[in-house]
Image (spheres, helix red, strand yellow):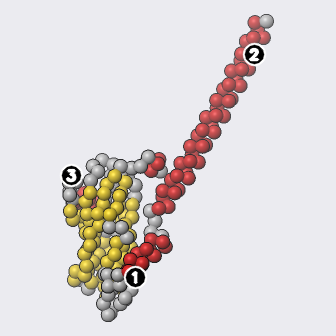
């Protein structure tokens, strides 16, 4: 009789192991699905899509004599999460002209890093030269930031300086607020 009890105990152990393995597999699969959905939503926000382009064009239509518009003058940027700032340049002159722009840190406020380090946060679109813009036409662009995780939370500004035929055309500032990465972005 004791042998029969051991055999039943072994069968019960195997059944328990199978159930635990299946439960773990379902848990992992569920986490992967939730992460993929959440990350897809977050990553889709950062692109310069047609909606963003239209919003910049709308800013020009509200102010037809504006030379430079910035989609958001105040931007909350999460550490280690790429972020794009959209802007537009309009040629308000009567002839086609060559434009260029340069983006650089201007006011670091209470931030403890250097202007050079702040400029290094810009990973794409820091400068552009030889932009041919016809009279009354626009150039729509963006610059991308990636703030490292070891930087303290603080506010600072970048200056967008636009030149027309080599002469200063317009300059505006955009404020960046460095914030900690939200929970869901930590897994993307």
Q: Is residue 183 left or right of residue 131?
A: right
Q: Which residue is mark 3?
A: 112
Q: Residue furthest front?
A: 62
Q: Which residue is mark 2?
A: 8
Task: Pinpoint residue 100: horizontal percent, then vertical percent.
Answer: 29, 78
Callout 3: few (<14), some (14-19), or many (20+) C-alpha neighbours within 10 Å? few
- Is label 1 or label 3 in front? 1
The disc at residue 147 is: none
Q: CA distance from mark 1 to mark 3?
A: 39 Å
Q: CA distance from mark 2 to mark 1?
A: 80 Å
- Mark 3, secondary structure of its residue: loop
Are the two marked residues, 1 and 3, in contact with CB atoms closer than 8 angstroms? no
- Residue drawn where x is 66% and y is 34% of the image: 22
Q: Quadrant of residue 167?
A: bottom left
Q: Quadrant of residue 71?
A: bottom left
Q: Which residue is mark 1?
A: 61
Q: Residue 44 versus residue 1: which sits nearer the camera?
A: 44
């Amino acid at each position: 009789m004791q042998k029969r009890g051991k055999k039943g105990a072994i069968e019960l152990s195997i059944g328990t192991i199978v159930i635990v393995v299946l439960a773990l597999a379902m848990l992992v699969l569920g986490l992967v699905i939730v992460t993929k959905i959440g990350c897809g939503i977050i990553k889709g926000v950062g692109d310069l899509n047609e909606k963003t382009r239209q919003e910049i064009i709308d800013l020009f239509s509200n102010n037809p004599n504006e030379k430079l518009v910035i989609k958001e003058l105040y931007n909350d940027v999460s550490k280690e999460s790429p972020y794009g700032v959209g802007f537009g340049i309009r040629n308000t002159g009567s002839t086609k002209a060559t434009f260029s722009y340069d983006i650089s840190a201007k006011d670091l406020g209470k931030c403890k890093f250097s202007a050079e380090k702040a400029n290094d946060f810009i990973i794409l679109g820091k400068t552009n030269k030889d932009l041919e813009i016809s009279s009354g036409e626009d150039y729509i662009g963006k610059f991308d930031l990636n703030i490292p995780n070891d930087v303290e939370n603080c506010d600072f500004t970048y200056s967008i300086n636009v030149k027309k035929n080599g002469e200063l055309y317009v300059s505006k500032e955009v404020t960046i607020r460095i914030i900690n990465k939200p929970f869901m972005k930590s897994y993307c």
